[in-house]
Amino acid sequence: MAAGCTAAIEGPGPGGSKPTETATPGPGPVVTEGIDPGRVGIHRLNNAEYDNTVRELLGTSSYPSDAFPLRGAETGINFDNTATALGMLQTQYEAYMNAAEALMAEAIASDAQRGRFMTCTPAIAGDACARQIIGTFGMQIYRRPLEAAEVERAMKVYDADIARNQSGTQAVGQALRAMLSAANFLYRIELDPEPSSLTPHALSSYELASRLSYLHWSSMPDAALFAAAQSGELLQPAVLEQTVDRMLADAKGSAFVQNFAGQWLNLRELFGHSVTPSVFPTYTPELADAMAAEGYQWFQDFLTQDRSLSEWFTADFNYVNGVLAQHYGFPAPANPDQLSKVQVTTDRRQGFLGLASFLTHTSVPSRTSPTERGYWVLSNLLCTTIPQPPGKVPDLKESASEEEIMQPSGSENVREQLERHRVDPGCASCHKILDPIGLGLERYDGIGRYRETYGNGETIIADGVLPEGATFSGPQELGAVLSKDSRFTACAANKLLTYALGRDVEAETLDLRTMQKLHEKWAARGLNLKNLIKEVVLSDAFRFRRGEPE
Amino acid sequence: MSSKIWLSRRNVLRGLGVSLSLPWLESLSSSSSKALAQSTETPQVVRPVKRYLLMYMPCGVATAFWSPQGQGAGDAWKLSALLEPLMPYKQYLQVLSNVGQEALYNEGTNSNPSHSRYCAPTFSCTVPDTKAAILGGPTTDQIISAYVAPEHTPVFSVGLPVGCSTMNSNPDGRHPSISRSISWKKSNEPLYKEVNPQAVFDKLMVGYTPAGEVAPEAQAAAQLVKDRNLSVLDYVLDEANSLHGKLSASDRIRFDQFLGSVRQTEAQARLVGTSMPGGTTKVYTRPTLSAKYNDMRRPGTPVEGEGTYNRNDHAEVMNDLIAMAFEMNKTSVVTHMLDDARSEYHYNFLKERSFTQGSLTSVETATGVQSADQQGDLLGYHGLSHAGDNNNGFATVNHWFVQKLASLLGRMAAPTQADGKSLLDDTVILFMSGMRGSSHELVKLPVVLASNSPVFKKDQHHVFSGQMPLANLHLTLLQNGFGIDANVLASQAMTDQIGTVDPKLRYGTGIIDALLA
């Protein structure tokens, strides 16, 4: 097998700046910008990636991860594909063993599935047909060509099964099952030629193919990607860009929206969000599903329409079905069972901050939480670190005193109570940063409906001053202010790079230059999501890696 | 939605029936349990207590109704309204008042407390890192596992972490392992709890075999399954060993988790079809309840935790499984999280109880747990904990937790053992929370010890003057219960502490004589 696409890089280590070229087997060189690419640890396939991969590989319609014990526990701080957060447990490994056994039993029993790998009929020990199947299908399982010793290791499993009087078909299935239970399948492992060297080296074309496929599809590479990896063409920037276009256009590209936007925008949280039924009797599972679906469609619209992210806070469109239209007070859509794009200009609802999904998951069950909304926008859309509370002040969301202060009791409304809260210097340091954005959104209630007064009839004042000095009145003006804030696009780039690499991005230290360069090139090209993905994919951090000191 | 049945080796055995007792295939086993037992034989250390169970309430208690009346032994003290369900088992209890670990938290540089950060630190007595999934050292159950498990059973060498949770609980902006796991093998290795009763049951059944006659064909089929599993594991281990040396330093550490998991799986696979020590003739039935986290619900599939799901059934079947694990001698250590630290699970299946300060009983009302704050908001577990230290909703949930301890004691205090002893005779149960109540305080923690071991005093309410370090309680159980010397502990390489914690705070300043008979 012609595997050797790994390109050795000569030249400066981390911090060096001289662009370096290197020879590769494919046409065209791999050029580094001389930026420290950092490194990504071994990456266990997360549950979604595992399911998608075996479905693609074997044509099964099952979701084996439903039986995995780490279901519900594999969330990183940012995304559930953070390599270092994907640990292993004995019970999880046992579940992988069981899944591989069941998957191969199903594949062998099904004509359609068996045809994917059983290209000849093996019968005896050491059979050349078995060796051929292991080599070709094994390449798909390991997402790279197998070394000769690896084929022989799998052949031992095959031979042992033949010795147990199993049929050739069963024995091949057993060998493939062993590979599906192995580290090279369960983990994405990118090997460094010198694991302790800090000198960056280009990823092999197969490693790059996997990075691309798990970024776009949360799944393994397809035949076209494998072909581009084999020829080495994939290493060319122009081919990389075409590949991004192709992969996003593919139906499997919905995995990117589901997994990236679903986590970045916390759309998944709506499944677990609960409200107080007596306060919000119209909040139903159907409405929650419609809110989440609108969030996905909103993101998808920016992606497929090449819409600039500068419109994020001002774009005036919504995606509604019957229940969501009613919720927003929009005219009923022609087809109430399906989301359709609408533009209502009289709704005082614009941009991302007007989406019911965002407004709901940042509220507490019975009311809004301006602090929570402000905190979410700052940390997820502006990537601003909120200073730690001084001394032993309890967590933001947990303070009993805050819970009390949020109760609309007596004659004070929420704004007045928060203002009183900010008089305390211990609280003020954070709350003067957190509260203005949330107070600017007070005209949307705890499930995102527009209102002008509180329950007691008092008019809602949604004026504010951001810590940077900008003033606004009402959510529309707040959106306009935020749309000029360059922290948002920098934050979007940070989030996408984090997701694409599967490691936390250290924007202030290790990845400072990567982030600067990324933002610069993206801005020059036009601030839409496709351009961002392309610039991420072309960055050194995506195409190169290095070792680490012992 | 797929509902196919996995053809695992366990299903093959299950297909042969669920009632089981007699060892079979013993002659086929090259490494029988006897050989295993011999190979791990070490100089005999006296371990008066054999089993350790942690039951954890994450959010503290409604403190107004927690403290027992009076102090001392026997009739000198009375159970409080929250502890009332334990009345039939008062003779096994020691309730500890004024235990805390505030001193430890004062040592930490970043001592901002929260629900999630109390889980593992309650049992490791360390200051956790705020962001990373790092909690500074193994929890007590893992220390005991490391010493005791090899002498008992190789099956669950890391104990059995279980819990009752199905909600996608808020992780407090930290790694979810922190708020959802109380058992940590190392500072960076959480042992997630298993919430699915069927999965726990299947795990316990490994190595056990159907009662009565087994047809030769079935024996041959089972042997084939075993051989093929071992063949796969040989391949996986061979490949993993060749990969190991090619990895960088931090990857090797993470890959060791994989290698360890595969080796454990192999050890279990070798046990299939062999007899197990301490076998029982009892017949166990696989639970019908299957519970899962619902974080990744695909649209169109039902939400776990809704519909027919009943948390009380879940908790009761977990109690069955804990007793079963101990009876079968499958593990020496079980940890049980009664809920997640930031769970907003609505306990509205419970009838709200009415508590009165000073009263030793509570009265069930006609309505479900559904209100606690002044607005009549429906609050989940964590929300209730913040609605004041005397609110009936939160107290009702705490009361239910105590009921679950009582129902487990009912199982464990019965003379079910072959020698007429009860499981509780050589078990110690530590039932507690790492926080006091709505205030997040680390002092005056709710702590109950239950045991019928002659090592411990019985029927006691201790009120310590001045704060008794929580580490001293752990130290007493480790040293006097399990024969694990404190000096050995402090020098162990496994104690990978971080920060600048005074070891005395971590390992305690001394044992608590008052607890010992």
Image (cartoon, rainbow, N blue to C red):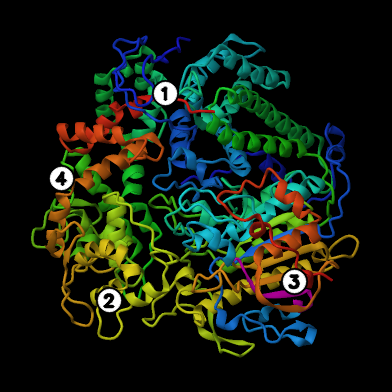
Image mark for residue B410: 3
What is the C-alpha distance between the residues marked 4 and 3?
64 Å
Per the image, the residue denoted by label 2 is: A420
Looking at the rendered image, the disc whose residue lies closer to the viewer, 4 or 2, is 2
Height in image: B278 above or below B418? above
Residue A85 located within the stretch drawn in magenta: no
Q: Where is residue B415 in the image (x, y as percent from the top left)?
A: 85, 67
Magenta segment, principal secondary structure? strand
- Labels 4 and 2 touching (C-beta < 8 A): no
> What amino acid is found at the position of numbered circle 4 in the picture?
Ser
Name the quadrant containing residue B101: bottom right
In primary-sequence order, the first of circles 4 and 1 is 1
* Residue numbers of the magenta segment: B89-101
Name the quadrant containing residue A167: top right
| Element marked by disc 4 | helix
- Labels 4 and 3 touching (C-beta < 8 A): no
What is the C-alpha distance between the residues marked 3 and 2?
53 Å
Looking at the rendered image, the disc whose residue lies closer to the viewer, 2 or 1, is 2
Image mark for residue A310: 4
Left or right: B77, with A253 as reference point = right
Q: Position of residue A478 (x, y in %)?
A: 15, 59
Q: Do labels 4 and 3 share a chain?
A: no
Left or right: B374, with B264 as reference point = left
Q: Which of B104 and A457 is in front in this view?
A: B104
